[in-house]
Image (cartoon, grey):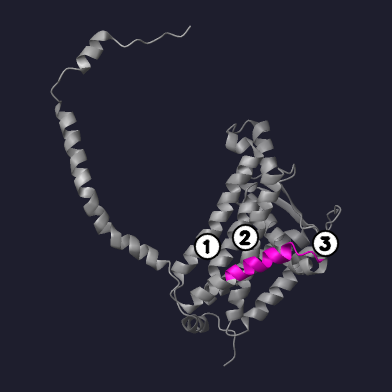
Amino acid sequence: MAPTLVPSTATSALRGLAVPRSPNAAMMTAAKQTISQAAPRVLRAAGPAIVFRRASLELTSDAQKITVGVFCGYFLAIVILWYFPVRFVRAILKPFKLQAVAFHELGHAVACKLTCGRVHHITLDINEGGATQMSGGLGIVTYPAGYLGSSLVGSLMIFCGFDIVASKVASLVIGVLFLLLLWWGVVKAMNVPLKDGEKRWIAPLIILLNTGLLVACWFIADSEALRYYVLFVGTLTATYSVWDIFDDCIRRDVEGSDSHQMAKNARESGFCMCFCVSNGRVLGIIWWFISLGLIVAAIICGILAFPESEATQRQNSDDFIDATSR
């Protein structure tokens, strides 16, 4: 039986006495009074700084306004095409969805190599699935790197879509990713037995189609078309990742999903019995919020980092790998 605590009569009597305050109590009282008096002055002084920070997020240039408007239009168009009742209309997004899947698998592969693992090959499925065969590596890094890696790539492309020069840099980085896909998804997977739905031509198609579009957009309208293409691919990739996390890891907790496998391995290995790591749906919720936060951060950082007008962006673009003939 647990002991029952009864307040002492002597203690209750002492509480009613007027005991002189100790020096520490007096100092605490004086500090509280000082803070209460100084707080309004601090807020008045910090007010202009807070207003300045808010004002810095205003869309001051034509390029910012157009980019945010185009991003919203892209997002709306992607959602409409995603659920459009006519199948061949939905197929318009198919190549870009497969590209998002490729970024997902590349996230696993790059994370595996960075944690001293070995990547055997990458295979892509016509039904928007994929698999990365690897050994070694750090599971706590490689498992979330698929969803979060593609979210990061998409968000960085959204960020770069606010500026022409940044879009040129993004296209060069995408070119490096395509080289990795060419190695792991074409060369290394050449003699690998394929499962149902897996096709050898998907990776080459993604590389050829999107490389061709990147190069073509580089030459159109002083590379301004490249900015809108990078913004579109980033919007679709980030949106695809957010939806995929919700569908596979939160709504259904698919057995083969990354979150389910990570939670299963955590339980079996006893590496971490924390509820957040050993439960697939909780992992999915965490990843979903991270992915959503990356998109929001990309838009905010794009507004803050690129306040230049479209004319200024064109001038800056001419000084960075100008591909147009004068």
Amino acid bearing label 3: Arg
Q: In the rendered structure, does residue 134 fall within the stretch colored magenta? A: no
Q: CA distance from mark 3 to mark 2?
A: 25 Å
Q: How many marks can you see?
A: 3
Farthest residue to the bottom: give it: 326
Among the two numbered marks 3 and 2 on one chain, the one whose residue lies closer to the N terminus: 3
Amino acid bearing label 1: Ala
In the depicted structure, whether residue 52 falls above or below residue 165: above
x, y (%) of residue 61? Answer: 45, 77
Give the crowd class for mark 3: few <14, some 14-19, many >=20 residues within 10 Å.
Answer: some
* In-image side of 273 versus 35 (left or right): right
Could you tell me which residue is drawn at 15 percent across and 26 percent down? 22
The span shown in magenta is 71-86
Residue at numbered disc 1: 298
Answer whether residue 26 is visible to the viewer in this image: yes
- Asked if labels 2 and 3 touch by Cβ distance under 8 angstroms, the answer is no
Among the two numbered marks 1 and 3 on one chain, the one whose residue lies closer to the N terminus: 3
Report helix, strand or loop for mark 3: loop
* In-image side of 121 versus 27 (left or right): right
- Residue 238's disc is 2
Could you tell me which residue is drawn at 69 percent across and 45 percent down? 251
Amino acid bearing label 2: Ala
Report helix, strand or loop for mark 2: helix
Q: CA distance from mark 1 to mark 3?
A: 34 Å
- Asked if labels 3 and 1 touch by Cβ distance under 8 angstroms, the answer is no
Q: In the rendered structure, does residue 74 fall within the stretch colored magenta? A: yes
